[in-house]
Image: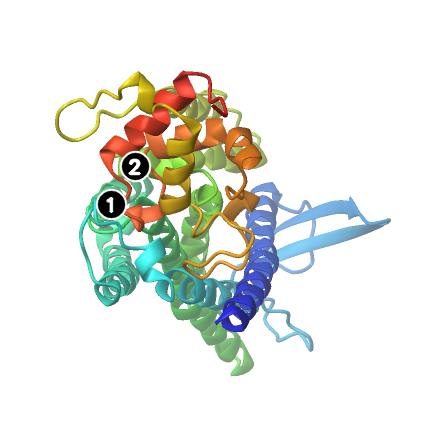
Amino acid sequence: MALEAYLLDWAQMLVRWLHLITGIAWIGSSFYFVWLDNHLEVPPKDPNPRVYGEIWSVHGGGFYHNRKFMTGPGWIPEKLHWFKYEAYFTWLSGMGLLALLYWAGASTFMVDPAVMPLEPWQAVAIGAGALLGGWLIYEGLCRTELVKSGMDFAVIGLVLLGLIAFGLSQLLGGRAAFIHIGAMIGTCMVGNVFFVIIPGQKKMVAAIAQGQEPDPIYGLRGKQRSVHNNYLTLPVLFIMISNHYPMTYSGAWNWAVLMVITIAGMLIRHFFNLKHKGIIKPWLPLTGAALLAAVAVFLYPRPQAPKGPAIVIAPERITFVNVQEIINNRCVSCHAATPSRGNFVTAPAGIKLEDPADIKRWAGRIHEQAVIRRSMPQGNVTAITEEERALLGAWYLAGASGK
């Protein structure tokens, strides 16, 4: 079993590394080509009337001259570079990571009895269904006339995203709900590449090869979906790192927190897209920053009232011996040099709680996660009681001493 967990840990690390590398390549190309499009200028003189715009740039010790042809140059270059595998491998590695970490460990990472007492297979089915259902909804919306109106499409899309986020937050643990929202958005993004952008480009290339004039609709649709992807990058990047910050996903309003941060990211991205065109609107990043500040204030740690009547801990019970017993029973199965629960090979976040010195060292973290935010134990898999949480809180407030 230890060998299996060790090998699984290596598999997760390598797939996560691949996901990060390919994601950087995909998002980097997205940012670059949006920047490129927004900086194109009409050439003063060009022998080819098909040229839509051009740009000169300097980088890496040399000069570059880019020109854009909306319907091709009228011939097929001998070497034509495509940008698609970054997207495909980002999605494939992300799905692999989702399966290795969340679906394989659904009882720990997806099911939270306090949210919904699901069987692991039910949680996995809900997560997988959200990916497919979310993509179908998005694709259906793109096939309506709304897609021609950027603002209307964005508003309706955000409302639908909010409803899905709310629904998942009522079924799955907060961490799993967030990561599945991110996977759903990523599925929509890679679907744009696989089903719309690349097929349209292939049809344009085929038409040129046959001596025909390409239908410009394919280029327009591809550009449209590419812009959608560009605005979704910052929210997806936030979701990728959100699992390190329980403050964002552990509360009852986690879905609203996610939506506000998503809107903030889109506003900031819109500022830079306009800035590339020479249009400066400071209110966009300022609004984004204000939304993030509002979330920070909203998430400021405040003790959550326990369910049922208030629990008063007698002073004589506030001892380190009692605290250590709770930690041993509820936390050490994961937070140990050699964890015995879940798919962990080492203690999560490097926090080990086997020794008295470590318990006192991490007293603040224990108080925040187990008492204030109540996000630990993950999904309450060790069934910590309200009285035990209250005792941990009383010990911390009394000075977290070793007595």
Q: Mark 2 points at which residue?
A: 254
Q: Mark 1 points at which residue?
A: 169
Give the number of callouts. Answer: 2
Task: Estimate how packed mark 1 is, as few (under 14), some (14 to 19) or many (20 or more) residues with alpha carbons within 10 Å.
Answer: many
Count neighbours of disc 2 (C-alpha within 10 A) and say few if under 14, some if 14 to 19, many if 20 or more. many
Relative image position of residue 147 (x, y in whole percent): 29, 50
Viewer-proximal residue among 181 and 195: 181
Q: What residue is shown at x 25% (from left), y 60% (from top)?
A: 123
| Position of 274 relative to 22 (above/below) | above
Q: In this view, does 305 lie to the left or right of 335?
A: left
| Residue reaching furthest to the right | 61
Q: Which residue is drawn at 36% across and 54% down?
A: 109
Q: Which of 389 and 224 is in front in this view?
A: 389
Looking at the rendered structure, the secondary structure element under dot 1 is helix
Residue found farthest to the left: 308
Give the amino acid type for the residue marked by disc 1 in the picture: Ser
Q: Can residue 301 be seen in this view?
A: no
Residue 153 visible in the displayed image: yes
Picture disc at residue 350:
none
For image coordinates 57% across by 47% down, the residue present is 31
Image position, residue 309 (x, y; %): 13, 24
